[in-house]
Image: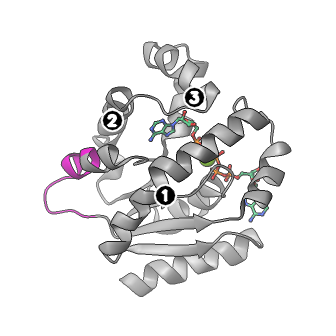
Amino acid sequence: MRLLIFGPPGAGKGTQSLIIAKHYNIPHISTGDLFREHIRNDSPLGIEAKRYSEAGELVPDTVTNEMVRTRLLEPDTEHGFLLDGFPRTPKQAEALEIMMPDGTSIHAVLNMLVPEEELLKRLSTRGRQDDELETIRRRLRIYHDKTEPLAEYYRDRGILLDIHGVGTIESITKQIIDGIESLR
Ligand code: AP5
Ligand code: MG
């Protein structure tokens, strides 16, 4: 099972990914989490990514694509993966096509829909480095400009699942699993 999850900051991508990845027994690969881990470890990649990530800007594709490419070569991805936060641009989507092993394809793309008011409410109480109001606004703008149009590319391919991302965590998980199963 190869899945992608899209959605604005605070949409619940990370929250749902943990549950869905466990359900399908596939690794949850979050580019945001990978960057934060590199930053914590002061690795060369972390030093490069830090200023972008903490400012809410996209990390350059050269860095991001290479990080994902390397991660997807790990043996635990053999039977699938849930990619959270990648691809975020049409260029990254092209890069992903090339990284995918021959004969494999994406089964479903989860498109988390949450009103902006709710996103601001959730993020204002979380307190991550990039959760300052001005930075949240920048992340939202980049999402609308760069990532949202990409969702339509997957809709045209018939694999985009719109998920109403407000309500209890359990009810959202159920929508996601029902949606994935409807595509199988
Ligand atoms: P990333 O870490 O992906 O951040 P994001 O997209 O801004 O999304 P968040 O992680 O903030 O939100 P989420 O949707 O995971 O929501 P969560 O489950 O945490 O990226 C960070 C940065 O890394 C980027 O800005 C960029 O710099 C860089 N980056 C990452 N990928 C990149 C790429 N491909 N290319 C270039 N740069 C890249 O939930 C949010 C809160 O809401 C939590 O407190 C949670 O408990 C709560 N919550 C969840 N569900 C519910 C619910 N149903 N009801 C109420 N509260 C809920
Ligand atoms: Mg997240």
Residue drawn at (39%, 33%) of the image: 64
| Residue contact at pointers 3 and 1, CB within 8 angstroms | no
Q: Quadrant of residue 183?
A: bottom left
Snapshot quadrant of residue 33: top right
Label at residue 148: 1
Q: Is residue 153 visible?
A: yes
Q: Amino acid at mark 3?
A: Ser
How would you rate the neighbour count of disc 3 (Cα within 10 Å): few for under 14, some for 14-19, many for 20 or more?
Answer: many
Which residue was labeled with disc 3? Answer: 53
Vertical position of residue 47 compared to residue 115: above or below? above
x, y percent for residue 37 = 56, 28
Q: Nearer the viewer, mark 3 or mark 1?
A: 1
Q: Is residue 183 above or below residue 73?
A: below
Callout 1: SS: helix
Q: Is mark 3 within 8 Å of ligand 1?
A: yes
**What residue range appears in magenta?**
95-105
Quadrant where the C terminus is found in the figure:
bottom left
Q: Earlier in the sequence, mark 1 or mark 2?
A: 2
The location of residue 28, given as percent across then percent down, is 49, 51
- 3D distance between C-alphas at marks 1 and 2: 19 Å
Q: Which residue is mark 2?
A: 65
